[in-house]
Image (tube, rainbow, N blue to C red):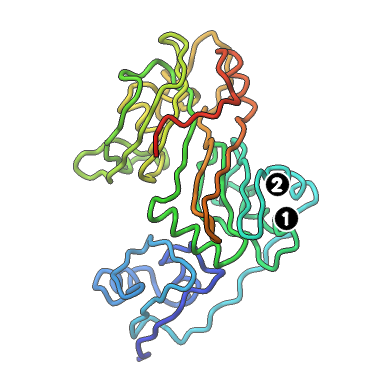
Amino acid sequence: MTAVQTLEVAADEAELRLDRWFRRRFPGLSHGHLEKLLRTGQVRVDGKRAKAGLRLAAGQVVRVPPGAAADAPRPAPAPRPGVSDRDARFVRDLVIHRDDDVIAINKPHGLAVQGGSGTPQHLDRMLDALRFDAPERPRLVHRLDRDTSGVLVLARSGAAAGRLAAAFRDKSARKLYWALVVGAPRPAQGKIDMPIAKLAGPRGERMTHDEEEGKHAVTLFATVDAAGKRAAWLVLWPLSGRTHQLRVHCVEALGTPILGDVKYGGGAAEIPGAGLAAKLHLHARSIAIPHPRGGVLRVSAPLPPHMRATWQFFGFEANADIDPFPE
């Protein structure tokens, strides 16, 4: 039986889930056995119990107990397909900030951040085009839904990834979203505190309000402008980071679904007769996050074309610099 080992998370493993870290390091360890080791507290990260979904940071120490095939060699990573010239030009045109540690892009609507079943085109497979002669490949440190556009931050090194990921974990990153909702929320500004949970069913990943099983989810919202009772422009500040949190809170707490969000709003997520794009109108407008070398990095992203057209239709100011939430 293998002795207990303490292994340090490598720079290229930053932001991996703990279960995926084990899958990389110890491919012979079954999922069921790993779950048992986690449940009984035999696996620890920096001396603390951990769950399978914990996102690791470079430099953290994982306790690997006996019986976890700890002497198995770490497999070489599979070679990544090359990035075509067309894709390289496309992804480089998305860059809105670049320094020695951080790249920020304006992710377009419809681009998945990571791959999956039926998703051959995604940002992760194009990241080598954003090296810009740096020795390391950029790393994802947070996510946006495929249909949500806006600011996405990338780390240019393992050390930067660890610091940025920590900022997202401890909620010191401040992300503001713009949304166009169908209807006008009442009150026009406030705080939503509504727990949400995954809804079981055949319709794919879907979240819903659940007081008993739901996870804590809080959003601040403020109405910037409105077209009577027809539609409203909201600024949203999620204080937690649950899956589809803003979409669920807009429809279930405010009763005003985000325009184009048929997944959660159904037919109510449309404005009949307006001729507006049937795309999700949710945009990660800005982020303020501690920079890996000190100070605060602030980045804003222009609206995508379909939202710009909607802002123009209603006479809203698409280039406004708005922050309704005092720090």
Q: Is 76 positioned to the left or the right of 250 in the image?
A: right
At horizontal 41% and vertical 39% (from top left) the residue drawn is 244
| Above or below 248: residue 49 | below
User: Which residue is farthest right?
Assistant: 85
> Badge 2: how crowded within 10 Å, few (<14), some, or many (20+)?
some
Q: Picture quarter containing residue 100? A: bottom right
User: Which residue is farthest left?
Assistant: 212
Q: Which element is circle 1 on?
A: helix
Q: Which element is circle 2 on?
A: helix
Q: Residue 75, position in %: x, y? A: 56, 77
Q: Picture quarter containing residue 186? A: top left
State the residue position of label 1: 129
Q: Is 193 positioned to the left or the right of 124 in the image?
A: left
Along the polypeptide, which appears first: circle 2 or circle 1? 2
State the residue position of label 2: 91
Q: Nearer the viewer, residue 259 or 169?
A: 169
Q: Residue 124, position in %: x, y? A: 61, 54
Q: Are marks 2 and 1 in contact (CB under 8 Å)?
A: yes
At horizontal 70% and vertical 68% (from top left) the residue drawn is 135
CA separation in Å, label 2 and label 1: 7 Å
| Above or below 183: residue 239 | below
Q: Residue 326, position in %: x, y? A: 39, 35
At horizontal 53% and vertical 62% (from top left) the residue drawn is 161
- The quadrant of the image that shows the C terminus is top left
Q: Residue 24, position in %: x, y? A: 50, 72
Q: Amino acid at mark 2?
A: Val
> Badge 1: how crowded within 10 Å, few (<14), some, or many (20+)?
many
| Above or below 279: residue 113 | below
Q: Is 305 positioned to the left or the right of 214 in the image?
A: right
Q: Amino acid at mark 1?
A: Ala
